[in-house]
Image (cartoon, rainbow, N blue to C red):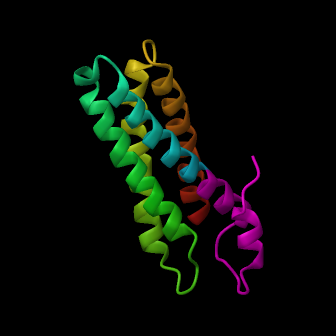
């Protein structure tokens, strides 16, 4: 998958206090998770058993919003605030774990939930790796 994340980071005129490769991978994982969670929530709304998927829809939408916001903040580096970035990444880890667990519970019956759970797990891992790199 080709994205503009790394090329944009490479053009940033000043130093960035993070590993640009890890940062780009995390932003891409966040964007992918945002899309997967949004699509999964919509697919859940189309299921005949939508009432059984209420919590799944809620966790999908929460996770999508948190991941989207985090990706946007991580894409900005002027007057960078490491404490804010750290807090958002920690929130993403929590949201992705919660959403991944909820989607995994429905994965046997709904393929969109399986795909979303996988995306949440990958995003959670990317966020953990970037947090570790931040020290």
Check the image and name the residue furthest to the top. 108
- Identified at 77% across, 73% down, the residue is 10
* Coordinates of residue 20 in the picture (x, y in percent): 71, 66
Q: Residue at x 72, y 63 (%)?
A: 4
| Residue 126 placement (x, y as % from top left) | 59, 49
Which of the 4 image quadrants contains residue 57?
top left
Residue at 60% across, 58% down? 27
Residue 52 point in image, percent of width and height: 25, 20
The residue under the point 45% across, 26% down is 113
Q: Please say whether residue 112 is one of the residues in the magenta stretch.
A: no
108 relative position to 54: left or right:
right
- Up the image or down, 95 lies above or below 54; here it is below
| Residue 132 in the figure: left or right of residue 103 | right
Q: Which quadrant is the C terminus positioned in?
A: bottom right
Instruction: Name the residue nearer the viewer: 105 or 129.
Output: 105
**For residue 10, side relative to residue 37 (left or right):** right
- The furthest residue to the left: 51
Tell me if 104 is positioned left or right of 48 in this view: right
Tag count: 0
Q: Is residue 19 magenta?
A: yes
- Viewer-closest of 72 and 20: 72
Report the span colored magenta. 1-28
* Nearer to me, 11 or 92: 11
> Up-down: is 134 above or below 118?
below
């Amino acid at each position: 998958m080709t994205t503009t994340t790394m090329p944009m980071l490479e053009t940033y005129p000043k130093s960035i206090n993070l590993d640009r490769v890890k940062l780009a991978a995390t932003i891409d994982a966040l964007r992918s998770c945002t899309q997967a969670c949004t699509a999964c929530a919509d697919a859940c709304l189309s299921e005949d058993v939508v009432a059984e998927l209420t919590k799944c829809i809620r966790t999908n939408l929460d996770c999508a919003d948190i991941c989207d916001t985090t990706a946007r903040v991580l894409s900005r580096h002027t007057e960078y605030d490491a404490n804010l970035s750290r807090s958002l990444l920690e929130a993403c880890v929590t949201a992705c774990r919660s959403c991944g667990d909820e989607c995994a519970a429905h994965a046997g019956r709904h393929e969109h939930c399986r795909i979303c759970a996988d995306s949440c797990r990958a995003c959670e891992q990317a966020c953990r790796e970037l947090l570790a790199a931040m020290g």
